[in-house]
Amino acid sequence: MDKTCEMNYKVVDSPLGEIEISACEQGVHEIRLHGGKTPDAGAVEAPPLPELLGCPGEMTAPLKQCVAWLDAYFHEPAALKDLPLPAIHHPVFQRDSFTRQVLWKLLKVVRLGETVSYRQLAALAGRPRAARAVGGAMRTNPLPILIPCHRVVCSSGAMGNYSAGRATKEWLLAHEGRLAEKPSCPGGSRGGGIPHPQPAGGTEDLWE
Ligand SMILES: [Zn+2]
């Protein structure tokens, strides 16, 4: 499984500017937000259709799936639940680590339109005290948007950081209808939207 991956690349246009996807035949490796457009939090309703730049004939299956997934994300979010997630093949997912656990939980548990606090996500990944490490894992997320690190916010309700910039995070949350109702955890302590954080010490899958 450590064979060198032969990478394919695709650049798609989006309301957030160009997005570059890289994938091998086994799965997607990275999504990069190149920016180039200033996201306008007011223009959420009618983002322009993404144009495919480049030659669609050469795309591998994971690349095609990822392009289709991003297209639906920006233009028809309701359709996402019927779309398969593209296979993922970035090295961080090929061996066990806290980062992998955090990213995986985020992908599986936190749905479109939901948010989770760094602390809640730490608990989901089996280390309730590791909120800071969750922040670190978010910074290294190789697949932003697909793995929704923009949905991870501070338990105070503050938005927190985002590697592609706070304006982008704000845009994404607004796009998902989350900006009006900011999450707040009463008392900022336990509880919140996600049921039953995993007890400390446990490791593997909770509730999939
Ligand atoms: Zn690969």
Image: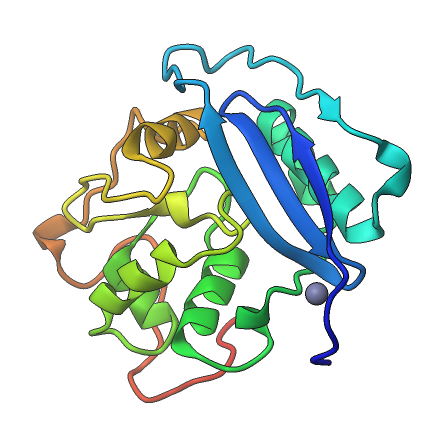
Q: Point out residue 192 in the picture as x, y percentages from the top left corner.
A: 26, 55
Using the image as rendered, state which of residue 118 and residue 6 is in the foreground: 6
The residue at the far bottom in this view is 201
Say if residue 142 shows up in the picture.
yes
Q: Point out residue 15 in the picture as x, y percentages from the top left corner.
A: 53, 20
Quarter occupied by residue 197: bottom left
Quarter occupied by residue 194: bottom left
> Horizontal placement of 197 versus 89: left or right?
left
| In the image, residue 37 above or below residue 193 | above
Q: Residue at x 32, y 53 (%)?
A: 193
Using the image as rendered, state which of residue 122 and residue 15 is in the foreground: 15
The residue at the far right in this view is 57
| In the image, residue 63 above or below residue 166 | below
Q: Point out residue 28 in the picture as x, y percentages from the top left corner.
A: 67, 55
Q: Point out residue 148 in the picture as x, y percentages from the top left corner.
A: 47, 48
Q: Residue at x 35, y 78 (%)?
A: 126
Q: How many marks?
A: 0
